Amino acid sequence: MTLALVITVAIVLLVFGFPMFLVLMVPAMLVKFLFYPTVPDLVLVQKTVAGMNHSVLLAIPFFIFAAELMGRGEIARQLTAMMAALFRRRAGGMGYSTIGAAAGFGAVSGSAPATVAALGGLTYPRLKTQGFSDRFSLGLIASSAEIALLIPPSLVLIIYGWLTGTSIARLFAAGLVVGVVLAIAFSFLVATKARHLTPEARGDSASKPRDLKVLWALGMPVIILGGIYSGFFTPTEAAAVSVIYAILVEGLVLRNLTLKKLMTFAENAAVSSAVIFILLAVGSTLAYFITIAQVPAAVIGFMQYIDAGPITFLIIINILFLITGMFIDPGSALLILVPTMFPVAQSLGIDPVHFGIVVSLNICTGMITPPFGLDNFVAASTLQKSVAEVSLGVLPFVAVNIAVLLLITYVPGISTFLPNLLMG
């Protein structure tokens, strides 16, 4: 009854366009007053505050601030130019460059919308210049941005790690592998489209970085991953260091950062962080009532009743998270579903890191799946195109995403071998 009420109310609020924090908060309040009126109001306050009061969550505003600095500054432009230079002698080289730039910027931002906003305007005109169709170019930009949800420092993996107590360092290692796998799969799709395209004219100055200063942009992934896996600092400390690094590179090396810009970037990061933390706060309250209502235990009992094993459960998870990812943002999808489904995954012996990667890849796919894929709307707004154009363009990439999803789902070793190698 509790789960049915939560799902029904949440769907109704979504259909009528209510803000996401109300979609999470209203069902929680209804469950409290209808089924658990004796729970003290003070408990609600405690659970709401607890939803934000965790040291690992400090990584989120730091990484968002670093993404603002590098995405709206000079580093994103230079990173795109460097990738274009690497592939400028290949037919359709800008297609590969777009994927590489998205992966590189994902290693800074951890956010798909931020990646689209930072790189879309830079790569779209040049994709068209090289001969890629308008539809394919739009689909490539929107889809490549999803790699940012897997490549460390993924905000999705940080939230999942906080919700489940899974090591974020292990999740980052797994996300790096799967992000590379997805990038390679997209590259094969680009190769099929580039067969009849001619290489970009050699010596095109627009495809070359202005100097070796661009290599400073690559220092961010080295700091984040190298620092974490060497044990020099934690993921949260790595996030703080990334902000300092971004300020130094943009301000002192590339000389593209003024005090006014810094204040603007800080304000934007603060607003984005506030939205996420509000969702975390109300999501924590909803998760509390789902837990005391023993919804996870009921789901486990149902799975045992139908004699469902890990394979059947993962099929259900793929469908559920894929559909959910089509309608709502990644953080909200995690807050709604993970508290219920993670205990079931544990009861079936599914590795927490593997489960987290499956969930994240499902959300990636859902965010570009028509007709409601969230990032299709972001790409359409950024590039001033219709949502229909973007939606048609992403269809081949959705198919590739699903193929990779099935591979990762049923070959767990792909997502677990690097975490096991690095951390035992």
Image: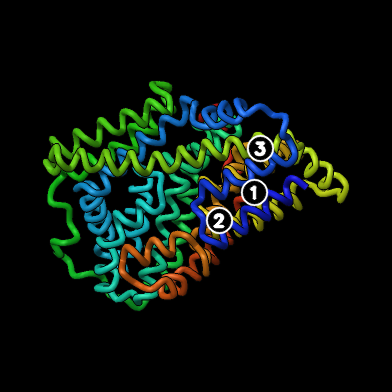
How many angstroms separate mark 2 from mark 1 (CA)? 22 Å
Kindly identify which residue carries mark 3: 351
Query: What residue occupies the far top of the structure in this picture?
Result: 232
What SS does tag 1 mark?
loop
How many angstroms separate mark 1 from mark 3 (CA)? 12 Å
Depicted 86 relative to depicted 249: above or below: below
Q: For the residue carrying disc 1, how many other residues have a C-alpha within 10 Å: few (<14), some (14-19), or many (20+)?
A: few
Q: For the residue carrying disc 3, how many other residues have a C-alpha within 10 Å: few (<14), some (14-19), or many (20+)?
A: some
Tell me whether circle 1 and circle 3 mark residues in contact (CB < 8 Å).
no
In-image side of 7 versus 297 (left or right): left
Q: Nearer the viewer, mark 1 or mark 3?
A: 3
| Image location (x, y in percent) of residue 4 | 73, 51
Q: Which mark is residue 325?
A: 2
What SS does tag 3 mark?
loop
| Image location (x, y in percent) of residue 50 | 54, 27
Kindly identify which residue carries mark 1: 411
